Amino acid sequence: MITSRVRVTLALVYAGLALNACTPQGVATAPAPAPVIVTTATAPSPAAAPQAPVGARTPYRTAPADWHLLDPASDGVVGVGARRAMTELLGNAAPKRMITVAVIDGGVDTAHTTLRGALYLNARETPANGRDDDANGYVDDARGWNFIGGASGNLDDERLELTRLVAQCRANSNRSAVRTPCTTLEREFTAARADAVAQWAGLRPVVTGDD
């Protein structure tokens, strides 16, 4: 059985033989014309626009630990200029009497070597005896008082900074050394947030007027 492909091949062979038989002997046939290759010129690509030079990177600068006391004009640091003010206002004047300054801010370590000699000590109060010796309504207020909570006026963790502390704990959660205190902070943060939400729920009708 001859397939169609074989039939086509045989037909081409027979056609070739017939053409050769019709060609006179000694007569050369004209060769097929050589293919003409046409090339087109490629337009040059436009030159890339020159880029603006990149300036040198500003070096990273770490602020000094006492940046808040420095002055923008004299020290080049955006602080409150406390040292400059003290120098210009007091100069070489010697203090005539001691004064006590009450600082309303976060808690400090009263046993710190730099602070303990300069902190006020309530001479009428005996520290850590559990009694209100000077009868002012505050127990063991020898170095001051914590007005935002804490046993015996002690400020374990600054409540105003609780969010920041919790964020630091979460960032270092892979360190086993901080897991226990961080768990405590997380619990306190959750309780403080729930308390804030409850307080706002009670205040909102008053603030917005939606009774």
Image: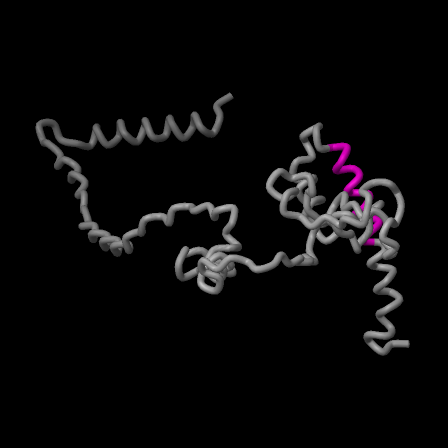
Q: Position of residue 187 (x, y in %)?
A: 82, 43
Where is the C terminus found, in terms of image quarters? bottom right
How many numbered marks, from 0 up?
A: 0
- Name the residue at the left extreme: 26
Q: Position of residue 46 (x, y in %)?
A: 23, 55
Residue 113 highlighted magenta (yes or no):
no
Query: Residue shown at 23%/53% (left/top)?
Result: 47
- Name the residue at the front extreme: 96
Magenta stretch: dominant secondary structure: helix
Residue 149 left/right relative to 47: right
* Nearer to me, 173 or 77: 77
Name the image colouring.
one colour
Query: Residue shown at 63%/43% (left/top)?
Result: 117
Residue 180 highlighted magenta (yes or no):
yes
Q: Position of residue 150 (x, y in %)?
A: 82, 47
Residue 77 left/right relative to 115: left
Residue 210 left/right relative to 45: right
* Nearer to me, 208 or 33: 208
* Nearer to me, 1 or 76: 76
Query: Residue shown at 43%/28% (left/top)?
Result: 7
* Nearer to me, 185 or 121: 121
Quarter of the image where one finds residue 16: top left
Residue 59 left/right relative to 205: left
Magenta segment: 179-193
- Name the residue at the top extreme: 1
Q: Position of residue 160 (x, y in %)?
A: 72, 53
- Name the residue at the bottom extreme: 209
